Amino acid sequence: EVQLVESGGGLVQPGRSLRLSCVASGFTFSSYWMHWVRQAPGKGLVWVSRINSDGSTTTYADSVKGRFTISRDNAKNTLYLQMNSLRAEDTAVYYCARVFYSGSSRWFDPWGQGTLVTVSS
Amino acid sequence: SSELTQDPAVSVALGQTVSITCQGDSLRNYFASWYQKRPGQAPVLVIYGKDNRPSGIPDRFSGSSSGNTASLTITGAQAEDEADYYCHSRDSSGNHLEVFGGGTKLTVL
């Protein structure tokens, strides 16, 4: 079964750091680009970051650029999101997702169950 | 603001047909994918590409596209289809970034 399982969320004070993990199973993790997407309470899905299959290329949404770092360990089938200088507006459920790119199409499948990050004093 | 625009809410009577739309410039050249999102659950892919359904998604879900608008159609809506639906594609810049629509809350009456 193809599966993604996130962990590492929790309550953190503004300005502090947190690292999220996403463990993949059931597929060849090292062959796929991976993404992080978040959903703030009562809001919609927002793309956060992506990383290519070997970890050499990363991209970020403007809202997290310079504060968040995406990385991966293909030997451990694990995706990471290092979040520094956290703000209240970073409060959200964070999802990892595998992406497929095919011609004029792209889609995320599967998604992890999500991990909640709450930034509050 | 999102580069993909969705109506915030749509309703449909049980067993009837409903279409949820997604508008954006990038959709003139790229297909949208669609996700079902229930509270407290992970998003689930329901449509990708021109009109493809992942294994396990009922055939009452279908997708289409015309000009700058993509549509998700549910033919014979069921109570369990009540959820938020999000479209997804790439942005209009040269960076090939991902973008989601703002989401549509579907209510099945």
Image (cartoon, coloured by chain):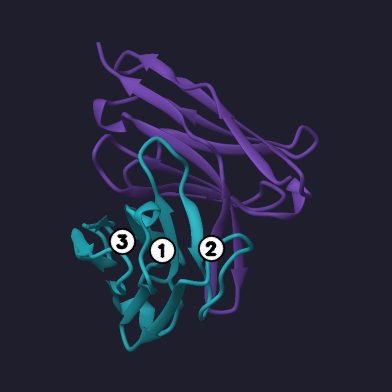
Callout 3: chain: B
* Helix, strand or loop status at disc 2: strand
Chain shown purple: that is A
Q: Which residue is pictured at 32% across the width and 31% down the height? A: A90
Q: Is residue B34 left or right of residue A121?
A: right
In the rendered view, tell whether residue B100 sits above or below residue A14.
Answer: below
Q: Secondary structure at mark 1?
A: strand
Q: Quadrant of residue A12?
A: top left
The answer to whether residue A118 shows anywhere in this view is: yes
> Splitting the image into 4 quarters, where does residue A73 fall?
top right
How many dots with numbers? 3
Query: Camera-side residue: B22 or A119?
Result: B22
As rendered, which of A8 and B73 lies closer to the eye?
Answer: B73
Task: Give the residue number, with chain letter if any, for mark 3.
Answer: B101
Horizontally, is A107 left or right of B2 in the view? Answer: right
Give the color of chain B as drawn: cyan
Identify the residue under disc 2: A107
Chain letter for mark 2: A
Quadrant of the image for the C terminus of chain B? bottom left
Q: Are marks 1 and 2 in contact (CB under 8 Å)?
A: yes
Going 30% across and 37% down the picture, which residue do you hit?
A: A40
Q: Which residue is mark 1?
A: B88
